[in-house]
Amino acid sequence: MTQEQKAGRYERIFEQLHVLLVKSNNPISGMATLSALLHHKMKFFWTGFYLLHEGKLQVGPYQGALACIDLKKDTGVCWAAINQKQTVVVPDVHDFAGHIACDSRSQSEIVVPVFMHDGSIIGVLDIDSDERNSFDETDARWLEKLVKLIRA
């Protein structure tokens, strides 16, 4: 898929999600809906959220194979995105020190922090691919925009 095609697909997902969430006041419903849309329309390997709960990063709404329930604090790509307060793109998870392998088929990953209106982070959108080098700046830009639609 070209960058233009990818951007077009994300734009259509954004428009669809916006219509679905315009009257929603439940961020968990938004996360579940976004996970389903991205997983099926972008054909990602694993798509979902990890949410901060009592100091732990725990799995939330997702689509794909069985997930790790708790992610070890300050380890892996999800915690890196939280600690850096920014999107993290990993072209090859085997090159990322401390990568948490919930599924050995995962080859590349992108993680986007989910911010509340007050600027605090409630969790992350985590997307895995079973191919290396699957994510780039187009993915980062659009996923950040999509996540903003579900802010609590």
Image: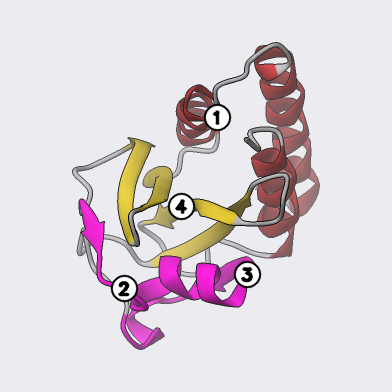
Residue position for label 4: 127
Distance of mark 4 from mark 2, alpha carbons?
19 Å
The answer to whether mark 4 and mark 3 are in CB contact below 8 A is: no
Q: Which mark, residue 147? A: none
Q: Which of the marked residues, 1 or 2, is nearer the chain's N terminus?
A: 1
Q: Which of the marked residues, 4 or 3, is nearer the chain's N terminus?
A: 3
- Is 72 a magenta residue? yes
Residue 94, image x, y percentages: 33, 81
Q: Residues within 10 Å of mark 4 (few under 14, many from 20)?
A: many
Q: Which of the marked residues, 4 or 2, is nearer the chain's N terminus?
A: 2
* Number of numbered discs overlaid on the protein picture: 4
Q: Residues within 10 Å of mark 2 (few under 14, many from 20)?
A: few
Distance of mark 3 from mark 1, alpha carbons?
19 Å
Residue position for label 3: 85
Q: What residue sits 31% from the left and 83% below the top?
A: 98
Residue position for label 2: 73
Side of 8 relative to 124 (left or right):
right
Q: What residue sits 23% from the left and 57% below the top?
A: 70
Check the image and report above or below for 36 versus 65: above
Q: What span is colored magenta in the figure?
A: 69-98
The answer to whether mark 4 and mark 1 are in CB contact below 8 A is: no
Q: Which mark, residue 27? A: 1
Residue 100, image x, y percentages: 27, 71
Q: Amino acid at mark 3?
A: Lys
